Image: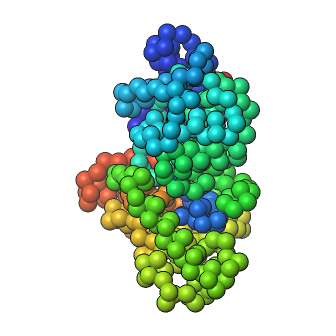
């Protein structure tokens, strides 16, 4: 995939709108190293912002019109900020949802002309929607002279996705795109939103492997997984009223209500209970240099997503199995919500190129897909390009 060039994007904005832009905002995608479907259950996550971005070139307007063009779709959309209403779909819904959430929180958003491009693949489990939200928020904040505070802006972008677009996502993706530090993953407590930087173990790197299977979270399966978790919490509260979320539940306590739960609901809750503190354990393994333990945790996470939460697919499982067959791989798992998208592998840095060639070749022979595999390093959150 062609890499995003901010200077080129600024030039194209000038060609489209007949003047020089005020600036270019960039927001990264992310991979989640571990802690899947735990964010909306109040647990821990360990995402890493990656070197693929959504870029938004922008210029303030003198009115209250939001006008945007997405190069990937060759499509332009516009709307009056005062007339924005939840339910707007498509890529523009994520942009408009940010403006709507800012306004709902008391900020005054100026109209703006936006030109959007990306080198982050869509619907690949790398959080292209959150990156679009955060890049839009960074651009609209600059155009409207709103102070940038990463945690607050992540929360407002989540509000836009939840209440305007209609996807009941957690906070992980927005926090990763907003608040990750250069060179480190983010261990995030999704209840308190307290985070700490976590460095990868020396000599190892993350390989991102695109399965080529695309999915849409707005299609309903994601929301149904969340509803299963809520059903389990409701049953637990009948006996344990202090339970706030599945983060508060041990495997033993969950077993006490098994007979009152649908078997599918029980399996899905079991995954979340087991997964909620794996990010803390993985961060500790990284700090101790215990790479064997790290790989074991990563593998356990995928197995739970496949067997208990049931969000994997044949292609993702194949990628994970091919990766685990390589001696230079510590562990592999799907990343993101599932239903397609990408898998990741923690790999010896010196053997990453060999690993990619071997796994990609075997995967293409089986699936006949030529999707992107790449090494990524941890990058920082949303920013303006000087």
Image vertical order of residue 110 relative to residue 44, above or below: above
119 relative to 125, above or below: above
Q: Is residue 32 left or right of residue 12?
A: right
Q: Position of residue 199 (x, y in %)?
A: 68, 55
Can I make out residue 49 in this image? no
Position of residue 40 measured from the top left corner of the image (x, y, whole percent): 58, 62
Q: Would residue 246 be found to the left or right of residue 123 on screen?
A: right
Return the residue nearer the eye: 16 or 29. Answer: 16
Q: Nearer the viewer, residue 153 or 372?
A: 153
Count of numbered circles on the image: 0
Q: Residue at x 50, y 42 (%)?
A: 86
Q: Residue furthest top?
A: 18
> Horizontally, is 342 left or right of 38 in the view?
left
Q: Quadrant of the C terminus?
A: top right
Q: Where the N terminus falls, by quadrant?
A: top left
Q: Residue at x 61, y 88 (%)?
A: 252
The residue positioned 40% from the left and 62% from the top of the image is: 221
Is 131 in front, or is 351? 131
Q: Position of residue 288 (x, y in %)?
A: 71, 68
Q: Quadrant of residue 278?
A: bottom right
Residue 6, by quadrant, is top right
Q: Quadrant of the rendered structure where residue 322 is?
A: bottom left
Looking at the picture, does residue 315 appear above or below residue 218?
Answer: below
Q: Is residue 256 visible?
A: yes
Residue 363: x %, y % from top left: 32, 58
> Coloured how?
rainbow
């Amino acid at each position: 995939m062609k890499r995003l060039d901010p200077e080129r994007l600024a030039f194209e904005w000038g060609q489209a709108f007949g003047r020089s832009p005020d600036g270019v905002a960039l927001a990264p995608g992310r991979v989640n190293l571990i802690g899947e479907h735990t964010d909306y259950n109040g647990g821990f996550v360990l995402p890493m912002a990656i070197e693929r971005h959504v870029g938004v070139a922008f210029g303030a307007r003198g009115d209250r019109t939001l006008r945007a063009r997405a190069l990937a779709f060759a499509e332009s959309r516009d709307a009056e900020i005062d007339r924005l209403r939840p339910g707007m779909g498509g890529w523009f819904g994520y942009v408009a949802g940010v403006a709507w959430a800012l306004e709902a929180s008391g900020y005054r958003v100026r109209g703006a002309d936006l030109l959007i491009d990306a080198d982050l693949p869509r619907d690949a489990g790398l959080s292209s929607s959150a990156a679009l939200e955060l890049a839009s928020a960074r651009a609209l904040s600059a155009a409207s002279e709103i102070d940038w505070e990463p945690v607050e802006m992540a929360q407002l972008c989540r509000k836009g996705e939840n209440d305007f677009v209609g996807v009941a996502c957690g906070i992980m993706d927005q926090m990763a795109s907003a608040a990750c530090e250069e060179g480190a993953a983010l261990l995030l407590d999704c209840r308190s939103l307290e985070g700490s930087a976590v460095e990868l173990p020396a000599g190892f790197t993350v390989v991102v492997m695109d399965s080529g299977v695309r999915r849409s979270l707005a299609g309903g399966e994601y929301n149904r997984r969340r509803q299963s978790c809520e059903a389990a919490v409701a049953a637990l509260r009948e006996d344990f009223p202090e339970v706030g979320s599945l983060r508060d539940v041990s495997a033993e306590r969950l077993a006490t209500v098994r007979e009152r739960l649908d078997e599918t609901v029980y399996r899905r809750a079991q995954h979340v209970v087991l997964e909620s503190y794996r990010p803390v354990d993985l961060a500790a393994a990284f700090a101790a240099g215990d790479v064997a333990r790290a790989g074991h945790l990563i593998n356990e996470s995928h197995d739970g997503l496949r067997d208990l939460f049931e969000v994997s697919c044949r292609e993702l499982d194949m990628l994970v199995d091919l990766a685990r067959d390589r001696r230079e791989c510590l562990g592999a798992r799907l990343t993101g919500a599932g239903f397609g998208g990408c898998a990741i592998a923690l790999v010896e840095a010196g053997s990453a190129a060999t690993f990619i060639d071997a796994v990609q070749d075997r995967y293409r022979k089986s699936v006949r897909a030529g999707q992107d595999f790449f090494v990524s390093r941890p990058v920082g959150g949303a920013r303006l390009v000087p």
